[in-house]
Amino acid sequence: DAMVIQNPRYQVTQFGKPVTLSCSQTLNHNVMYWYQQKSSQAPKLLFHYYDKDFNNEADTPDNFQSRRPNTSFCFLDIRSPGLGDAAMYLCATSTRLTGREQYFGPGTRLTVT
Amino acid sequence: GDSVTQMEGPVTLSEEAFLTINCTYTATGYPSLFWYVQYPGEGLQLLLKATKADDKGSNKGFEATYRKETTSFHLEKGSVQVSDSAVYFCALRGTQGGSEKLVFGKGTKLTVNP
């Protein structure tokens, strides 16, 4: 089945130690998104790619970076994780066609110690 | 800008009870509307969607009708099960600039007791 895959499902990192989360998709969608979701909250969009065109949200901290080397893969880099960055990170994909839904991966739960 | 206002929970029901979760929106033009469900520790799954006025989305016994006149997209189910316990998010995708994005409501946590 076509899907969105996130690895790892659980990630523990130390305060200030860089960490990379990965996302891959078999849907061949041209838009990929990264969300941060904290407990009991809605997902918060960090940034998205339309093909290789990067779109950052105005309130996304500089500590968060992203790379999309090809259509299938997208990475989230947290350069210096703080305790406040502990959250679920969700990757999603979609097309630019009007009305199309986003397809979400299972998420990566990040713990910062 | 576009926004979604969703009934805040938590909502606790007994099995086989009727469920309604209210959702209203503010948007220009004719957005597409979605309900997503999130089970504990998992990502969001699309539950149903509607892309134009008077469309009814339905899936797994859940229904929602796109009401342009009341700018609403309320989620309903006639008889809930314990397995429906989850968090439900109403969302819209606009038609203006930045339309690749979803605008989410705050989510409603549903607990169904046996």
Image (tube, helix red, strand yellow):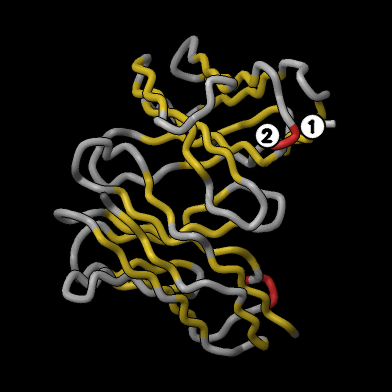
Q: Is residue B3 above or below residue A80?
A: below
Query: What amino acid type should be assigned to the residue bearing mark 1?
Result: Val
Q: Is residue B78 above or below residue A15?
A: below
Residue at 37% over, 24% down: A55
Picture coordinates of residue B78, whole percent (x, y): 49, 85
Picture coordinates of residue B65, whole percent (x, y): 30, 73
The residue that label 1 is drawn on is A112
In the picture, measured across the screen, residue A30 lies left or right of residue B111, that is left
Q: Residue A85: which numbered mark, if any?
A: 2
Residue toward you, A20 or B44: A20
First along the sequence among labels 1 and 2:
2
Residue toward you, A87 or A70: A87
Q: Residues within 10 Å of mark 2 (few under 14, many from 20)?
A: some
Quadrant of the image occupied by residue A37: top right
Quadrant in the picture for the C terminus of chain B: bottom right
Q: CA distance from mark 1 to mark 2?
A: 7 Å
Q: Secondary structure under badge 1?
A: strand
In the picture, measured across the screen, residue B96 lies left or right of residue A62, that is left
Query: Could you tell me which chain the residue with mark 1 belongs to?
Result: A
